[in-house]
């Protein structure tokens, strides 16, 4: 934070990361560095290993080898739930709302360090739990207003539309107060105006200093919102750089963008 | 006690024991979505630990506390291999465990009395409560415990802890990436549920003044399942109501109908089970959430 060489500060570093399923190299000696405070776009053909990379980064899958750093700290063997407290948040490709919880509860659930998540506090410190719960609820309601979901706060998440579920997933992730967020196709199946709304949210988050890595298939959109684009193919990052450079890269054109 | 009163006391004692037992399962299945087909094992572990310690001279109150810790600890330990398992494998693991425990109590006669069971242990406040009123005292004790367990579980159900448990039931991976320590929650749910099962087992031992392995067949676990589903998963009130209906009406309450129905006792017992089956099927068709459950939060 205090000056230094800002250029070299990475929010996320992936070194020599490998994840295989049987004989399939889903992620193959992958390297990736993402600078703090930027939006990175991760593109690549289907089966390139993008989502698997996210699963490994968030700790839901263990890598076979390699290292992952969140800022300065190595998190390769840190369990998923602890990565959250270190500032990592993610959303899923297929929105996974907790269908049988109400919208408001979906968000409240995501607040960290809740006193009421300990049985002892629930039984013996009910007042402290209630007070914190009120603060969490206020924060969750603010978030719902911000995402235009306020009217739906008491609805069960399973009854939301696809686009509303996407927004809910973003809100839930933001309740974590993350520093680095991984988003798996936030715009898939979303209408253009909602897509623009989500883009706006991403830019707003970047302005607040967050670092974002987005998997996206809509190349036009990736080029528009990303500061840096990573192209993944067969488990490796085959190219990275500013959008203009990527658009002209021959390897990328061959593997993904296609000629023309 | 005269007339019908002893009978009512008996039925309500048994209902209370099953309510306690099923409340433990409801925490694991209704709230956390964990399929425990071996719940009866923890009832057995609680009961035997308490009885054996008492027979070796440990005061009944201390023996109960240790028994609860052992039952709860066994439940928590079982989640360690179970953590990697998805729903159906957890079911296999737990039912296997419960049968292993039953055979252990059956075959280790030097410790457990084997098939003959164990008698001669002391019961709470036996020296103070007159023996002719002891069942009435036990009834009060059991329902007092049910009430305390109910309040404690209701608080948990409405707390952030309960919310996290429900999120695990819905989608473990989401719970993890929202920072929830899923393994720890499962362990806690198994610990508490097993403590309740252990407590129910002790009450049963006190009620019979006797314990033997034949109390702990797997069918008992499934009675608890019927109770939870009948009353409504994830609803503690429903679980108590379910116990009242299954045990009070079907298992013990219909006994007095015996003389009125032109069937021998065995056929009548079978008919009773068939009726429970029909009742469950009808319930699943028209009220899949159970009697008091919330349809919009259906557990499965």
Image (cartoon, coloured by chain):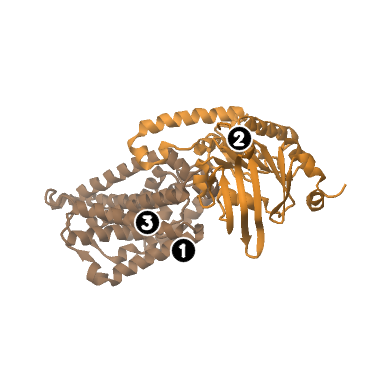
Chain colours: A orange, B brown
Q: Which chain does the residue under circle 2 lie in?
A: A
- Residue B92 badge: 1
Name which residue lies at 56% across and 37% down. Answer: A178
Find the distance from the CA under tag 2 to the CA under tag 1.
45 Å
Quadrant of residue A160 within the rendered picture: top right
Q: Give residue A99's position: percent from left, percent from top.
A: 57, 43
A247 vs B23, left or right, is: right
Q: Does the image show residue B20? A: yes
Q: Does the image show residue B26? A: no
Q: Give residue B27's position: percent from left, percent from top.
A: 41, 48
Q: Which residue is mark 2?
A: A210
Q: Which chain does the residue under circle 1 lie in?
A: B
Q: Give residue B281's position: percent from left, percent from top.
A: 50, 55
Can marks 2 and 1 be said to lie on one chain?
no
- Please state which of the two labelled residues, at mark 1 or mark 3, is closer to the viewer: 3
Name which residue lies at 63% across and 53% down. Answer: A52
Neighbour tally class for label 3: few under 14, some 14-19, many 20 plus, Cα within 10 Å: many
Q: Is residue B11 above or below residue A206?
A: below
- Please state which of the two labelled residues, at mark 2 or mark 1, is closer to the viewer: 2
């Amino acid at each position: 934070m205090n000056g230094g060489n800002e250029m070299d500060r990475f929010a996320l570093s992936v070194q020599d990361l490998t994840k295989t399923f049987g004989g399939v190299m889903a992620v193959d000696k992958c390297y990736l560095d993402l600078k703090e405070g930027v939006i990175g776009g991760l593109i690549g053909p289907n089966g390139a290993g993008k989502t698997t990379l996210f699963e490994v980064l968030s700790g839901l899958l263990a890598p076979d080898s390699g290292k992952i750093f969140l800022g300065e700290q190595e998190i390769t063997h840190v369990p998923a739930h602890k990565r959250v407290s270190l500032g990592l948040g993610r959303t899923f490709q297929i929105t996974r709302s907790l269908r049988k919880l109400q919208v408001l509860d979906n968000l409240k659930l995501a607040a960290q360090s809740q006193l009421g998540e300990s049985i002892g506090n629930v039984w013996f410190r009910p007042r402290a739990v209630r007070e914190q719960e009120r603060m969490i609820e206020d924060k969750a309601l603010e978030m719902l207003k911000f995402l235009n979901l306020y009217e739906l706060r008491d609805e069960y998440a399973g009854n939301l539309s696809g686009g509303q579920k996407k927004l809910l997933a973003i809100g839930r992730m933001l309740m974590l107060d993350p520093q680095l967020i991984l988003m798996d196709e936030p715009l898939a199946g979303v209408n253009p105006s909602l897509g623009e709304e989500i883009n706006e949210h991403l830019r707003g988050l970047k302005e607040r200093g967050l670092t974002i890595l987005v998997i996206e298939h809509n190349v036009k959109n990736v080029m528009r919102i990303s500061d840096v684009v990573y192209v993944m193919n067969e488990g490796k990052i085959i190219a990275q750089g500013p959008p203009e450079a990527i658009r002209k890269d021959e390897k990328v054109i061959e593997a993904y963008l296609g000629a023309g | 006690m005269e007339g019908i009163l002893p009978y009512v006391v008996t039925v309500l004692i048994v209902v209370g024991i099953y309510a306690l037992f099923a409340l433990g399962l409801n925490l694991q299945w209704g709230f956390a979505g964990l399929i425990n087909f071996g719940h009866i094992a923890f009832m057995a572990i609680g009961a035997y630990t308490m009885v054996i310690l008492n027979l070796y001279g440990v005061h009944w109150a201390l023996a109960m506390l240790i028994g609860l810790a052992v039952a709860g600890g066994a439940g928590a330990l079982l989640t360690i291999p179970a953590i990697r398992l998805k729903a159906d494998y957890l079911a296999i693991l737990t039912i296997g465990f419960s049968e292993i425990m039953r055979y252990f109590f059956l075959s280790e006669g030097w410790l457990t009395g084997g098939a003959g069971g164990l008698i001669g242990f002391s019961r709470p406040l036996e020296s103070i409560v007159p023996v002719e009123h002891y069942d009435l005292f036990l009834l009060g004790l059991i329902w007092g415990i049910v009430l305390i367990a109910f309040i404690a579980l209701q608080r948990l159900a409405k707390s952030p802890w309960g919310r996290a448990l429900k999120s695990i039931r819905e989608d473990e991976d989401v719970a993890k990436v929202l920072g929830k320590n899923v393994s720890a929650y499962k362990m806690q749910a198994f610990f508490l549920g097993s403590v309740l099962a252990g407590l129910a087992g002790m009450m049963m031992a006190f009620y019979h003044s006797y314990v033997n392995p034949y109390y702990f067949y797997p069918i008992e676990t499934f009675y608890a399942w019927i109770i939870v589903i009948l009353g409504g998963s994830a609803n503690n009130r429903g679980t108590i109501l379910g116990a009242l209906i299954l045990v009070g009406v079907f298992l013990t309450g219909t006994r007095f109908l015996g003389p009125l129905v032109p069937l021998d006792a065995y056929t009548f017992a079978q008919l009773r089970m068939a009726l429970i089956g029909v009742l469950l099927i009808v319930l699943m068709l028209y009220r899949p959430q159970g009697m008091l459950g919330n349809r919009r939060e259906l557990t499965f």
